[in-house]
Image (cartoon, rainbow, N blue to C red):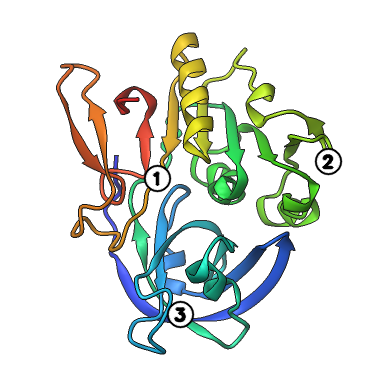
Amino acid sequence: MKREHRIVRAWCEVETAAPVAERTYWLEFAAAEIAAQAAPGQFVMVGFGGRGWGSPFLPRPNSVAAVRGERIGLLIRAYGEGSRRLASLNPGDSALLLGPLGTHYQLGTARRILCVAGGVGLAPFLFLPRWAKKATGEVEIRLLYGERDAQAVFEPSKIREVCGQEAEIWTEDGSLGKRGRVTDGVDLNGVDLVLACGPTPMLKLVRERALGARVPCQLAVEAHMACGVGTCIGCAIETVDPHTGEKGYELVCVNGPVFAAERLRW
């Protein structure tokens, strides 16, 4: 389900920029109109318009990771030339933001929620706890967060500061938190709703577990996209209507990025 809101396109100034893990940076933009409307799971396209031609020529999608007053927070991991340019922004620099875009997590009447985050898939779950308590009242959230090793883990004190609660950290080599993949921590006993964001293999495993246990599950899907508004058709994925069995394609940027697990044709 998608809320009605106004998409904003504006040059926004960086107010905070700090490294929080290996090749990972926390940016906060002054973006009052976006902050007033955003919900966890939604994203913004971040680019530079015609200023200083070069990478990234096309904007990049980034999940809204926090709303702090009139600012939004973004979690940037420097994978390539484009994300490295975004990560190099300093306070006082500006970028062209478009958003909020896409669908967001729907909590309904759920009171015990399991969130599973892989890598920078942590972003919407930094936003979700404070938003959920404001939107729906008291909820119990268990946040599982996995990385390959301690160097890649988002600073735990910053997690507490931003989202207001602890994350249960898993690292594949056991160098911080519990040893193993984040999905090793998934326990669906007594859970009303599962939310996940991260690499596709992780999402597929969470989806399989949740569907098998008949626990409602929503997944924020990753996809390459150039526009964020359904024009380029670059982020189409295979879906199925769980009621009719009709197969088709939907766009991650418009129909997602958050999908009910049963809609994904994986």
Query: Residue 210: image x %, image y %?
Result: 49, 18
Q: Secondary structure at mark 3?
A: strand
Q: Residues within 10 Å of mark 3 (few under 14, many from 20)?
A: many
Q: Is residue 233 above or below residue 165?
A: below
Q: Name the residue carrying label 2.
A: 176
Closer-to-camera residue (40/227):
227
Amino acid at the residue labelled 3: Ala
Quarter occupied by the C terminus: top left
Residue shown at 32%/71% (left/top)? 8
Q: Gap between marks 1 and 3, in whole Å? A: 23 Å
Q: Is residue 16 left or right of residue 178?
A: left
Q: Gap between marks 3 and 2, in whole Å? A: 34 Å
Quarter occupied by the N terminus: top left
Q: Residues within 10 Å of mark 1 (few under 14, many from 20)?
A: many
Q: Name the residue carrying label 3.
A: 95
Residue shown at 42%/45% (left/top)? 222
Q: Is residue 37 visible?
A: no
Q: Is residue 232 above or below residue 131?
A: below
Q: Secondary structure at mark 2?
A: loop
Amino acid at the residue labelled 2: Leu
Q: Nearer the viewer, mark 3 or mark 2?
A: 2
Residue shown at 59%/71% (left/top)? 87
Q: Which mark is residue 250?
A: none
Earlier residue among tags 3 and 2? 3
Q: Gap between marks 1 and 2, in whole Å? A: 30 Å
Q: Name the residue carrying label 1.
A: 104
The reply to whether callout 1 and callout 2 are in contact (CB within 8 Å) is no
